[in-house]
Image (cartoon, grey):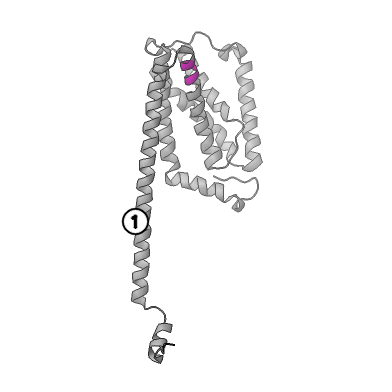
Amino acid sequence: RVMVPPAVRERARRPLRRGGARVVKDTTEMAEKKGGRFAILHGIRGGLVVWLVLAVVVLLLPILLNRANTFLLIEMIILALFALSFNLLLGYLGLLSFGHSAFYGLGAYALALLLLKAGLPFIPSLILAPLISALGAGVIGFFCVRRAQIYFAMLTFAFGVILYRLVFQWYSLTRGDDGLVGVPIPLAIKSTTTFAYLAAAIFLVCALLMYLIVNSPFGYVLRAIRESPAGWPEGDAVL
């Protein structure tokens, strides 16, 4: 048995000095900062790899596929863009929208009507169409975001039905269930392959913007709202 002097035993029982505690704290914070930097660098590298692979796949597919499969690819790109916007609302904010396709259709009809009725060139129409859709979404969202949970879902469903009936009954403007025929398309994108590249370019730009949004302070606020719904009274607004 080893005999420990009483003075040494008493010193061992004393709490760690402030200086030592400060050293331990500083060392811990430094390690956390370094770990955070490594995590950020790893996330950036992983994101760049995903983006490069996605860009290569999108560039090669229109060349390798035939006309029918290229047209199917265009449909997939359009629906993928629709899914990105829906995921921002449901996946990051936790709000289920039954009327999300209304804004999808509003942008499509806006582009077609600007080309057919207003006679605008394709590029200005392509820029104005999403702005018109965003304006419609802002008006509808003004009423919907004042409610949450099932109330939000039912409000979005109601507005979706209203726009659906408006499109199918305003025959003089939208041609109802016959649809808009003869929409002028520029010769530069009449080719299925060229149109696929245009759709892919728009998708990549929108996907990059979505990535920046969800990784911004605003995106973290959306996650916080989704993870803490109990703090909001039932039916009250979350934004």
Residue 171 drawn above or below residue 15: above
Say if 57 sits above or below 6 in the image: above
In the rendered view of the protein, which quadrant contains the C terminus? top right
Question: Extreme top residue here?
Answer: 182
Q: Main secondary structure of the magenta part?
A: helix
**Which kind of residue does numbered mark 1 sit on?**
Lys
Picture coordinates of residue 72, whole percent (x, y): 50, 18
Query: Is residue 74 in the magenta section?
Result: no
| Residue at x 49%, y 13% (from the top left corner) | 68
Q: Is residue 189 above or below residue 204?
A: above
In magenta, the rendered stretch is 69-73
State the SS at label 1. helix
Q: Where in the figure is residue 58, as x and y percent of width and height? A: 40, 25
Of residues 222 and 199, the one drawn nearer to the viewer in this rendering: 199
Residue for point 63% across, 42% down: 149
How packed mark 1 is, by other alpha carbons closer than 10 Å (few <14, some 14-19, many 20 or more), is few
The structure residue drawn at horizontal position 51% and vertical position 45%, both measured from the top left corner, is 222
103 or 25, which lies in front? 25
Picture coordinates of residue 152, whole percent (x, y):
62, 39
Front-most of residues 56 and 239: 56
Place residue 191 in its image quadrant: top left
Q: Which part of the image, by quadrant, shows the N terminus?
A: bottom left
Q: Is residue 190 left or right of residue 176?
A: left
Report if residue 184 is visible in the image. Answer: yes
Give whichever of 95, 15 is nearer the camera.
15
- Image position of 202 (left or right of 76): left
Residue ranking furthest to the front? 1
Q: Which residue is mark 1?
A: 34
Q: Quadrant of residue 186?
A: top left
Q: How far across and down, in percent of the image, does residue 17 sit?
A: 37, 78
